[in-house]
Image (tube, rainbow, N blue to C red):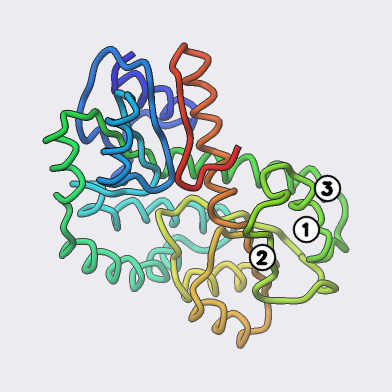
Amino acid sequence: MNTNDLMNTALSLAKLDKMPYDTNIIVEGENIKKVLIGIDMETPELLLAQNLGYDCVVSHHPKADSCIVDFAKVMDVQIDRMVKSGVPINKAQKALKKQQTSIDMGRHASNYDRVSSAARLMEMPYLNIHIPADFITEEIVQTRLDTAFLNKPRTKLSDIIDELNSWEYYQGKAAQPVIRVGSNDDYAGKIEVLMAGGTNGGVDVYKSYFEAGVGTIIAMHVPENVKNAVSEQNIGNIIIAPHMPSDSIGLLEIVNAWRDQGIEVKTMSGIVE
């Protein structure tokens, strides 16, 4: 196996035919047999991998080169997601623009060479696989909730929490599913799982979903300003399915596919098995 093989497996599982802007092969490598993968893999983890005899490192979150500089561009996938939920395409684009511009300005000024230069100096094959894993997670969680609450229009937020807590990914973990906007007895309405947009779309994006008829958004995390704005709007709910366990769902689909292909894979740095 080489780095292209690893990447192509991830893209295939996510039903993608090319690498998104937040996903890339930073340092190529051949004859890969042992992979160390985690949510956040930077220079310390590269050194750890080298010391432990691994021959490839994979980070979920973008840490290097174009994955950082062009990160805001991947947020365009949120437009299609909003349209699918009933938001007009012109409104979706405008709702996303403010947050996208803010992310772009911050990432453009970042030290994008920090981790990649370390990987190159160490000659350590290094990949970043972000939104492909998030696409997988979003589809799995959405399908599970759709199945659990099919023909149950009076589903309450407490029912969603109970369903998430029944899943091994969330059981016994330090971070637990939590209601950030709403209460246990509030009706959920239409449930949308938003876990694959690069990063949070911001206040305007959340408001657009609720105005289009979504009742409850399931996300991995929510900024305080978004939480406060949605609370003030008082027409929607937000439930958080914790970041690390949720990221692990899609990543472990990829990890298990690699293992089936004969690769020894060790998980760390936030991935829960």
First-in-chain label (1 vs 3): 3
Mark in the foreground, 1 or 3: 1
208, above or below 84, in the image: below
The residue at 27%/69% (across/down) is 101
Q: CA distance from mark 1 to mark 3?
A: 12 Å
Looking at the picture, how far across and down is residue 262, in whole percent? 46, 11
Element under disc 2 = strand
Q: CA distance from mark 3 to mark 2?
A: 19 Å
Res. 270 mark:
none
Element under disc 3 = loop
Q: CA distance from mark 1 to mark 2?
A: 8 Å
The residue at 45%/46% (across/down) is 269
Mark 1 neighbour density, 10 Å: few (under 14) some (14–19) many (20 or more): many
Identify residue for label 2: 239
Looking at the picture, how far across and down is residue 131, in whole percent? 42, 44
CB-based contact (under 8 Å), mark 1 and mark 2: yes
